[in-house]
Image (cartoon, coloured by chain):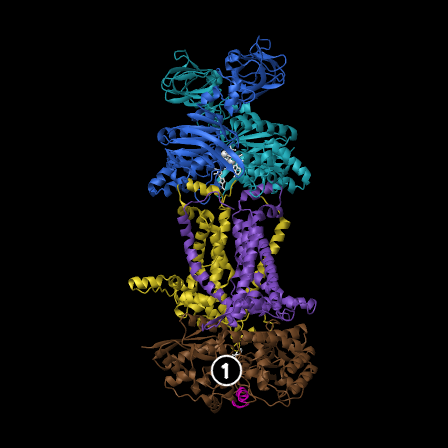
Chain colours: A blue, B cyan, C brown, D purple, E yellow
Amino acid sequence: MASIVIRGVRKSYQKNAVVHGVDLDIASGEFIVILGPSGCGKSTLLRMVAGLEEISQGEIVIDGNVVNRLEPRERGCAMVFQNYALYPHMTVAENIGYALKVAGVPKAERAARVAATAKIVNLEAFLDRRPAALSGGQRQRVAMARAIVREPKVFLFDEPLSNLDAKLRVAMRAEIRRLHRRLGATSIFVTHDQVEAMTLGDRLVVMNAGRIEQVGSPSEVYRRPASRFVASFVGSPAMNLMEGRIDRQGAFVYDAQRSIPVPFALERRLVGHDVTLGIRAEAARLVAPETPGALPATVDFVEELGAGRVVHTDLDGLSFAVAVSEPVALEPGTAVGIAVDPADIHLFDARSGIRLEGDMSPAQASASQN
Amino acid sequence: MASIVIRGVRKSYQKNAVVHGVDLDIASGEFIVILGPSGCGKSTLLRMVAGLEEISQGEIVIDGNVVNRLEPRERGCAMVFQNYALYPHMTVAENIGYALKVAGVPKAERAARVAATAKIVNLEAFLDRRPAALSGGQRQRVAMARAIVREPKVFLFDEPLSNLDAKLRVAMRAEIRRLHRRLGATSIFVTHDQVEAMTLGDRLVVMNAGRIEQVGSPSEVYRRPASRFVASFVGSPAMNLMEGRIDRQGAFVYDAQRSIPVPFALERRLVGHDVTLGIRAEAARLVAPETPGALPATVDFVEELGAGRVVHTDLDGLSFAVAVSEPVALEPGTAVGIAVDPADIHLFDARSGIRLEGDMSPAQASASQN
Amino acid sequence: ETTKIDFWFGNTGDIAKRVQEQCDRFNKSQSDYEVVCTSQGSYDASLQNTIAAFRAGKQPTIAQVSDAGTLDIMLSGAFYPANKLMADMGYNVDWNDYFSGIKSYYATSKGDMYSFPFNSSTPLLYWNKDAFAKIGKDHAPATWEEAAEDFKALKAAGYACPLGFNISRDEIWQYGEQFMAVHGEPIATKRNGYEGLDAELVFNKGLWVKYIKDLKGWYDNGEAVLKSKETGQTFVEAFAAGDCQVILTSVGDHGNIGRTAKPGMNWGVAMLPVYAGTERKHSFVGGASLWVLSGKSDAEYKGAAAFFNFIAKPEEALEWSTVTGYIPVRNSGYDYLVKEGFYEKAPYAGRELAIKSLTASPADDAKSYPGIRLGGLLQIRQEMANGLQAIFINNADVQTSLDEAAARGNQILRRFEQTYKGKQLP
Amino acid sequence: MEKRATFSSTTIGLLFVAPMLLLIFVFFYWPSGQALYWAFTLEQPWGGGNQWVGFQNFQQLLADPVYWNSVVRSLVFALASTVIAMGLALVLALFTDRELRFHRAYRSVLVWPYAIAAPALGLAFRFILAPEAGLLSVINHLSPGLWNPALDGTDAMIAIVIAFSWKYIGYNFIFFLSALASIPRSLTEAAAMDGAGPARRILDIQLPLLTPTLFFLLVINITESFQDSFGIVDIMTQGGPARATELMVYKIYFDGFKGLDYSGAAAQSIILMLLVILLTVVQFRFIERRVHYK
Amino acid sequence: MVERTPVFDAICQAILFLGLLIALVPFAIVIIAATHDIRTVNTVPMPLVPGRDLFANLAEAWQRADLGVKLFNSVLFATAVACGKVILSAMAAFSIVYFRFPGRSALFWAIFVTLMLPLEVRIVPTYAVAANALAPFQAILDTTGITWLVQRVSGIEVKLEWGLLNSYPGLILPLVATATGTFLYRQFYLTIPDELAEAAKMDGSGPVRFFVDMLLPLSRPNMIALFTIMFVWSWNQYLWPLLVTTDPKFGIAVTELRALIPSEFGLPDWNVAMAGTLIIMLPPLIVVILMQRWFVRGLISTEK
Ligand SMILES: Nc1ncnc2c1ncn2[C@@H]1O[C@H](COP(=O)(O)OP(=O)(O)OP(=O)(O)O)[C@@H](O)[C@H]1O
Ligand SMILES: Nc1ncnc2c1ncn2[C@@H]1O[C@H](COP(=O)(O)OP(=O)(O)OP(=O)(O)O)[C@@H](O)[C@H]1O
Ligand SMILES: O=P(O)(O)OC[C@H](O)CO
Ligand SMILES: [Mg+2]
Ligand SMILES: [Mg+2]
């Protein structure tokens, strides 16, 4: 319902710059997920969109209007606050219904909408309580309901599900998706949860230290991380990364003796360059130690995840994780081989961290980083 | 360093009973994870152990002493609060060091320990800030550091990592494990995160609505959920559950025409009983629709998780999830077959929800529930 | 149609109730006027409120002003002179019917009375007859020399407090001003200020200095004891309780002491003592007088005049003296009281001495002083009190302290003079 | 102390202060302006006119050592009564806030002192403080002559400090209590977990979080001890003995209200006002820095 | 929270109890004085055993001071002043804290300075203003020549007049015009978490709604404290009410109490005066007791 354009937006607190120039175009009705490490500026960015934080530089355009100088209520956004920010003196029902009351929605309709929303977030039984008498997750759901009930043109979610259990989270995720389908509200969703990030968004924005590292569809980000940072950050367990250099044969040398052949390294003219090589845990397979072409490693420990398990191995001093779907019985110290399909290899420039792909030379890569 | 025994503990707020009698023995040095839906009483239980909440009934014994009437500071526990509860007037360093100051630790030592702890939680750069100038995740890390720095005999963690990103969370998890190894402090860790729950704890406690549903090692809980609730709650995506009845042939009938053979149903004398059948998404396989013995279903949608994907199918009106590790290209509406290994089937009594196993008759199951 | 007139006064407590009763009697006595009487909480508040109201044009018709504020209002031109009012409204008042000591206090130097004395008093010496009997005396001391002997004797007879006194601002009246009045001593030059705003204080130069020295001597010997609110018991309470045997206080206290005295205690009053060889002069009046303010309508002035006429009736004087400790202000009233046998009855006997004191010398006696007409009199009293406190509490030298008090008082007078530069005393 | 979240509409902002501004303009600034104008004149009380005298009133005051003494006394009084009234009220409020038994009774009754009318206060304290017969006279039984506010200036000062503080304990108490009520319980809990006992928590958590109220009360108490003390002095000591309790405001009240020296009182008012404003500014500059608003 | 600090608790109780005693002693004296007859009340020391004249004294005080009407007026007056202060101060502080217009802090100081000059000092000119509350504006019009101009142009003489003497506004308004409340609210507003204002803004509320829906309810403990103090303070005001109300219809209880206090040479019937005090003290005490019941702990984030 509303497009959002973020242009060269920066933010500093006194002398600390925390957002260093963000550009982002969000189409009307799009569902954008922002992912990034703690403290990278996600909340700050969201708050600038909402109008809660002065924009130090740059501009934010909603639906074609520069909103820099507009009050929050003139921007038509609803927001779920990371720390809930519930009204302590109001009951759950009043908290949820407050925006409607402000908007002058008649009492009966308000009550109906509050009840409907409370149902969505599973809070029907708590409508008369004050926030102080709620559990953490219940509070978060009130915060969520407060935004949902408004059916705004823009939704801003700041880690709205972090305090919910897996089951409820799945349900809420489905609910949010349904809501989005129904209302079509442009949404920005900040999360730490990989699954949320992968499943919810049309596009994923990965931020780091006040900058955007990559924007793309979830699978694109997962499959072709634009930088070493994205590669390491997206996906759990994290991608295995190894520092090394491409030798004359086009193989990646990470150790005096060991190397991994990287077929496309030659065609990409990377010979002699320092690179970071990345392999996802689920792209590697455990094979018998003596399998030809397999990297010899020893098992460190096995992490049991219920649905799957991660075998942490020691690869000549580097730790290397391999995801395994079938139950395995591997004692620590067992020697194993790790097989990697060359197609699953990611290469990043060692200096700039940028992805090395196609015909791009490392020099170019470094240049484009700045 | 300290064993904790919780005996028949109940808690009511005015007329609302929220903890209905919890019994739990925690060995000295054990690492217990509590998992349960939002509002089930996890925080309340933790707070009773800490001494922050009066115990309405029952008793809590730490290291052989009944602590019901002891003050928080006499119990020797450190706690990470779900809402952080940082001291707004103190800097990060002062927040972290406060317990040491109270304990009379000399200034120099204090500074050193604060610095070391700040390093663990990645907050070195923020030591002079006030909480108001921190991001959500940074605040949570301060809360964490405040507990860590004390090296207490009991650790109580109330969702300490919920606001952290996956990468940091993995790191913190490793840190907590290391800490636990080093200090050996008995720990109770409340979390919503399945992975955390599976990987951290020696034992997992699953709570529901103020009661303990199951206590066991993570894999035990995952593999042999003691109740339908546990089955549905632990594991992501949630276990597929279907209501039905066991027929004369020992097959599970969930629909007028369809049935799933359950080999052990006969030997367990379950014929004619109403049961809930559970199959984990990763225990089911997608096969060609015409495969003999396979359940015919149609694809609803595919959830892409990066490392894997979940195919949501429609099984005669029931939704049924199948986890798939290889990329698949399945359009919604495609007909598929679902194959299940009978060994992967879980059965629960339909009335009591209790697991049906071994020689137990449903009658027994119902009885043991009360 | 009745005309309402406002009357603001400062008295409180049961006196306020008595004033109210008097107003009610007036209102009942006729139907043309209704006087609305409001207690303002204190003399100061009453004056302050009247001034504020006057400046805003909302003044009452009649206001009570205590002795200390007399000069300010006299210079203000804010009033309708009493003598003129009564003449204008057709009342024939014999102004010479007022006791000399009272008339002169409120009259101009030319003898015109600008206000009506209302609640009037003068100080007397109160003595405990039982205690004096113990030292073999049946009369009060008439001179200070005699008093000094009596104090000594009382002390010797075991009385802890032969003379109870206090030296706060409120007590300068009986221990300072009235002392000088009855001794015919000036407080200030220019006939205590009656003849010009450039008067200077001279209390530090006459007999008063000796008196204070004597008082200090008695005090040091334990024959005179400070009794005040601050010590927990005022000298009046101490006398009524039989703890102090002699005090100087207003005749206004006569009734109270009667009502609060220790049962069975025999006590009496006498005129203030004088030093031997001094010719007794009249004492000054205390209390307050009623002023009529300018700027009101004729009807209101008529009402005011009617009210004054009413309260001047001898029967009113009798009633007033019966229910309060105040004295009649005119010969005719006094004569009526005497005639009615008022002064023979137990609780009232002795109060006639107040009249004696006020009329001890004729008004035209050149050696007596008509009253005190000094600007900032209250502040001057405070300076005198501070001087006395320095003497009695800090053991400061008597002469030096009184000199300083006079010097500070003179500064007040000069400020006052400057404030009213160009104005003439009427 | 700047808010992060503010509103931008100046008009609405001004509308919100407007009623207050209007009132203080009409009922404070206008009349005060007039009263202060008198400081440069000699004003006839009945409004007959005035003489412009420039700074003469000030010169006379400032040249008078007695006046300077009263300035010093006022400062001593302000300091002593503020410390006592705030200190005791704080202790009582902190203890009441612990919600021990009877805390409801404490909560009501400890506010009462502020509700007593001045004459009753005077009478009661006369009864309590009188050296011969009062409740405090026991002191004199222990050591004769030790306590005599009638004759000893220091004792008299102590007496008015006690009476004034007694009244303001109620005032401070209620504000402390309301401030304590809004300290989040979770912080106290966190401190308890950190090993702090009740006393320690008071020092480390509650006091710092009370600083906005402490600051408010500090400023108000100091200001009020300069402004509101004349009633007590008038009832109890009238500035005596020997000027020992002659506070600045009492002299203003006496000279202006009783003595009708409007100009002298106005000049003293200006000096008093400047002094109080100076003290207040100092507090805002130097003490407010230590206030934790968030 | 589990607390077991018997020693500290005992110390607290002891100190609180002592505080209670100290707070109550003067009241006890007043009550005892009100039970005596005139002779007993004037004996030194006054006996601490209560006398028997309480009801007689109460009746005398009631009747002499005409307390029925006066108490009613007092309640009205004190409530109005307290409410006025509570509301206007809240508004003014809101403006000062939550807006960012130039001159904000100057405004704060302008309001603040009103604490520095007591009414007693400026009572005479204040009365003049009360006699015509529009006088300042008239004066401004006069001195700026506008009066003259209007007169010349339209022939109308500008004469603004609004007399407040003997009226409830006259009683109330001047006492509302001080800064205590504004300062208190400022202090409180500064402690309110910004998130609340932000959430409210996101929910579409503008300043007015935020003020009404958030600030007012959140300031309840402060408001109650301020109301209590201001009620008591106005209840005990006497100088101003005395001056502006000459019509007994508007008289208030405390001025009547003043009139009960014995005059210098009047009968020292302190027993009656104290009985009057007792009656007159009752309403503020009731307010204090009622108000304390409304004190609710921790509206601002009682978190877990
Ligand atoms: N003060 C209170 N008064 C009444 N009920 C309360 C109070 N505090 C908590 N509850 C209720 O007790 C139940 C348990 O709360 P608790 O905080 O222990 O939940 P939790 O398991 O920690 O949930 P979450 O995961 O959402 O934090 C909740 O349903 C909550 O609403
Ligand atoms: N008021 C402030 N003053 C100074 N620095 C601040 C302030 N608020 C936030 N910051 C800093 O700005 C950076 C970005 O903060 P922000 O809240 O946007 O992080 P975030 O990405 O939302 O992190 P999280 O996932 O932990 O919530 C952080 O490093 C934080 O410390
Ligand atoms: O109390 P009064 O009325 O007798 O007056 C006494 C003196 O005038 C005090 O100034
Ligand atoms: Mg954030
Ligand atoms: Mg919780």
Q: Position of residue C19 (x, y in %)?
A: 45, 78
Label 1 CB sits under 8 Å from any ligand 3 atom: yes
Tell me, yes or no, if residue A47 can be seen here.
yes
* Amino acid on which the number 1 mark rests in the picture: Ser
User: In front here: C131 or B280?
Assistant: C131
In the structure shown, which secondary structural element does the residue marked by tag 1 occupy? strand
Up-down: is E266 above or below B330?
A: below
Neighbor class of circle 1 (other Cα within 10 Å; few <14, some 14-19, many 20+) is many
Looking at this view, is C327 or B48 the one in front? Answer: C327
Q: Image height check: is E16 above or below C127? A: above
Q: Is residue C359 magenta?
A: yes
Q: Is residue C401 magenta?
A: no
**Closer-to-camera residue (A208/B336):** A208
Q: Which residues are magenta?
A: C352-365
Say whether residue E72 is visible. Answer: no
| Spot occupied by residue B314 in the image (x, y as percentages of width and height) | 38, 20
Residue C215: x percent and y percent? Answer: 65, 80
- Report in which chain the residue with disc 1 lies: C
- Looking at the image, the residue that sits furthest to the top is A292
Identify the residue under disc 1: C120
